[in-house]
Every structure is written in structure tokens, then in C-alpha cells.
Amino acid sequence: MFYGGEVFYGGQQKTLIGATNPEEEYIELITKDYSFQEAFDALDRIDWDFKDFTTQYLTHTFHSYPARFIPQIPLTFIKLFTKEKEIVLDPMCGSGTTLVEAFLNNRHSIGNDLNPLATLITKVKTTLISEDEFRYLDKRLSVMKHYLDLDYGRINERINNLPSRKISKIFNRVIISKLESIRETLLEIREEGYNDLFDFGRVALSSAIWSLVENGGGIDIDMIFLKKVKSMQNEIMEMNRIIKVIPTVKVICGDSRKLDVDTNLTDLIITSPPYVNALDYYRVHMYNMLWLGMDFDLFRKHEIGGHSHFINNRFRLLSEYLGDMLRSLIEMNRVLKKNKLCVIVVGNSSLEYELIESHKFFAEMGEKIGFKPLRTIFRNIDITKKYSSTDIGKINDEYILIMQKINDAQVTAKNDNFISDIVREEMIKFRERIKEHQGTSIKGRKPTRERLLKNVDKINEAIEKIPEDTRIKE
Ligand SMILES: C[S@@+](CC[C@H](N)C(=O)[O-])C[C@H]1O[C@@H](n2cnc3c(N)ncnc32)[C@H](O)[C@@H]1O
């Protein structure tokens, strides 16, 4: 953010007198006032790889999240295509990167995600907490520290009280006892009326559990938790200092295929949907959700891009995914104001060695429902920020699809026949394409001729099943 010659960026306030490095040149570029066309032209002057740029600052540091995007992507579109106080929506907001950038830049924001852990993280990253409240938290946690070891005597009682019995099989008894002390303290904090502190503490707890699951070990889990609380406090205190006007933030735990958002409300949509066949978020976050007592059944059932079904015919995952994404696109069209931008960030994936270029499907489907694809930007992902999926390997690059809403969609997201028809067209085109250009998966492997024939058969079967596979599960 520029305040006169001052810029706030990457967690620091700087005075910028002439840019001296690529990061400062970028800041200078996105901070000017532009017409729509000028802003659009400015996109060409950005190096989208953002190599070595600062991406971990302020509340972005709170919690890991697979396949999150770097803050510069939403920031660029927020700065270039919205004004202060306008409304930015991310309908699959994950850990809330878009909302944090909107918050820092005085834009109102709405974040939606079906993963209850995602919406908790997003809420906490965009909620300021006063110094007085933090003093109260410090006091409560010092009392807790005092009792941590004594409380170990209550382990059997604790195991009976766990939010889910499955947990006792995953962690050892010392860890369970410590985590339970923390959880109970947080529950008491909520009973005393400190809801924001309760959520804040739950994110710190979840982040500590994440490091336990990812890095192993964990007898010192209480220390990891307390360290996390301290660093999160410092970031929020810094936000308190920086933010002069607090924009509104609405976080919804809901399905992007039926958004709880008013029609023609938002000035920009920026989002990164799940990839097809990459990962199941509900599995990745299962331990965290179990500890936090979250019910993830609804999420498991309606998660887009999940891949633990249709094992015998992976192409059915594709038609299901396209149907889900088409419904989500129709909803995005409904809530976006006319002529405004819908920006979708997605990488390629693969199924049975065939390349899936999701951004091309989205652009084609978008055109059928009132969007005009304006441009697709290719970007390399920084080596330190790549993420891997066992099925599709390392994701090295991604695409930023920019579409403009030209018209209202003439259908609703509930129209099963329309969804089936469009998905069928896309699947037929896909089948013909792979016959012509025998695909290469993003791992670089080419299917054999024999495999290609098998794949074509499987795609034909998937096409037959489209009405069944694209229906929303009850
Ligand atoms: C690639 S992640 C988004 C990451 C986000 N851009 C960030 O920076 O943290 C995709 C998100 O889509 C969410 N998702 C999956 N199915 C959904 C659905 N039916 N409705 C809403 N969100 C869904 C997942 O929970 C996940 O958070």
C-alpha cells in the first residue's frame, strides 16, 4: 500500500524513492491509478514468477495450507481492478490469502469454503484482537503451563473425553494429555466470552498439530503451541498498528456450487479451485479437524476434486469435476457485477497419463454462461513453493485465467440438464483431442497406443454416466 511516498508491503513499512529492485518495481506498478485498459496493459509488465518475493508476512504465516497461492496474485488484481471499499470474493478461499490482502488494502471481502478448518483459519487471519485480550490470554496460558504435568494424572479420563476416539490411536498418551489441557483451556476461554481468542487459540493448536503430523516427534507439543501463540500475537499486534480503517470481512462455511451471497454484489472474484485428482483436503486435515471437534462429513461428501472414488475409471472424476466447477462458475457469474473480473488460478493435472488443462475447460465453459475469457497468464511456481501430489507429481507451473462477466448466465447452477449437456460436449472434445494428440501426463509419460484405446473406452463409459456423476449428492 502506498501512503504518499510510503509503502506497506511484505510486513514492513518502507519509504520508496524510486524502485531499486524487481519487488519494489512491482509495488510501484500496482500502486498507480489506472483506467481498466491501462490496468489490463499493466498485467503485461509484471513478472508473474515473483521469484524470491516476500510471501510469508503478517497473518499469512499462521497456518500451512496445501496449494495456497502466493499473496501477490490476489494483491495484483485487488489493487489494479478494485477501489477501496469495493467487495472482493473468494468462493474457495482455503486459508484466506485473498481475504488477508483485501483486508490490508481496505477492501470489503467475502470468503467461502466448505472446509471448516479453512474458514476458521481465514476468520482468525482477518480478525484484529486487542492488547487487553492478549494480556488475558497470556494469563490463562501461564496457569495452564503450571498444570500441564500434573494434569497427566487425568489421562484416562481425558481419553474418554476426546472429541473423537480415533485420536487416541494416532498420538501417544503424553501428547494427548498435553493437547487436551490446551483444548480444555481454550474451551474455558470461550465460556468466559472470549470467542475471538478461542478461535485464535484453535488455529495455533491446529498449526501445532500440523507440525506434529508433518514432522513427527511432538513430546514438546505444548512448547510448539505456546511459541506459535506468541508469533501469531506479534503478527496481529503489527496488523493493529498498520490498519487504520477496518473493512468488513464475511467468512462462510459453504459450498461454492450454491453460494450464500447476493446476486450482482461483488466487484472482483479471485480464487484457486482444487485440481482434479490431486488431493483430498478432508484427508489432509483430518487430524486437525478431529482435535478441533469439527464435523467433516459434509465436506468429505461435497469436496470438489477429491479423488478417492471412481478407482476403476478415473475419467469419471473428470466429468464430475467439470460439473462441479460449471455449477461454481454459474454461481460466480450470478454474484459478480457486470463487466467485472473473475480470475481463476489453476495448474494442469493428469488422469491415466492424459494431460488435463483445467484452465481451458474453465474458459470454454465460462463462455457458455456469460463470461468472456480475456487472457490466460502462465507462471512458473517458485521452487520453494511447489506442491506435490502422489497422483500427478510436482506441480511446477500454473495458469491465471482472467474472464470478464459480459452477461448474466441464462441458467441456474441447479439446472442438471444444462450441466450434463455442457459436460458431455467438453468430454467429447477431450476424447477427440487425445485421439489426435496422444497426451503426455505432467510427469512426462506418454500413454502407449494400447493404453490410449483403453482410455478412449473409459471416456466413452464416463460420457454415458454423466447425468449420474454430475448430480449433486444428497
Ligand atoms: C487450492 S485450495 C484454495 C487455496 C487458497 N487460494 C489459499 O490461498 O489458501 C482449494 C479450496 O477449495 C475448497 N473446496 C473444495 N470443495 C469445495 C466446495 N464444494 N465448496 C467450496 N470450497 C471447496 C477446498 O477446501 C480448498 O480449500
Image: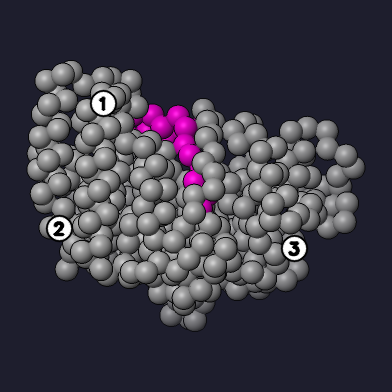
The answer to whether marks 1 and 3 mark residues whose Cβ atoms lie closer than 8 Å is no
Indicate which disc residue 467 carries: 2
- Choose between 349 and 2: the one closer to the eye: 349
In the image, taking residue 426 as reference, residue 30 lies left or right, namely right
Q: Position of residue 45 (x, y in %)?
A: 70, 37
Under mark 1, the amino acid is Glu
Q: Position of residue 440 (x, y in %)?
A: 30, 24
Indicate the quadrant containing the C terminus: top left, top right, bottom left or bottom right: bottom left
Q: Above or below — where is 14 with respect to 245? A: above
> Which badge, 2 or 1, comes first in the chain's sequence?
1
> Which badge, 2 or 3, comes first in the chain's sequence?
3
User: Gap between marks 1 and 3, in whole Å?
Assistant: 59 Å
Magenta part of the protein: which range? 384-403
**What residue sits 49% from the left and 46% below the top?**
401
Under mark 3, the amino acid is Arg
- Callout in the foreground (1, 3): 1
Establish whether ligand 1 lies closer than 8 Å to the Cβ of label 1: no
The residue to which callout 3 is attached is 241
The residue to which callout 1 is attached is 436
**What residue sits 90% from the left and 42% below the top?**
17
User: Gap between marks 2 and 1, in whole Å?
Assistant: 27 Å
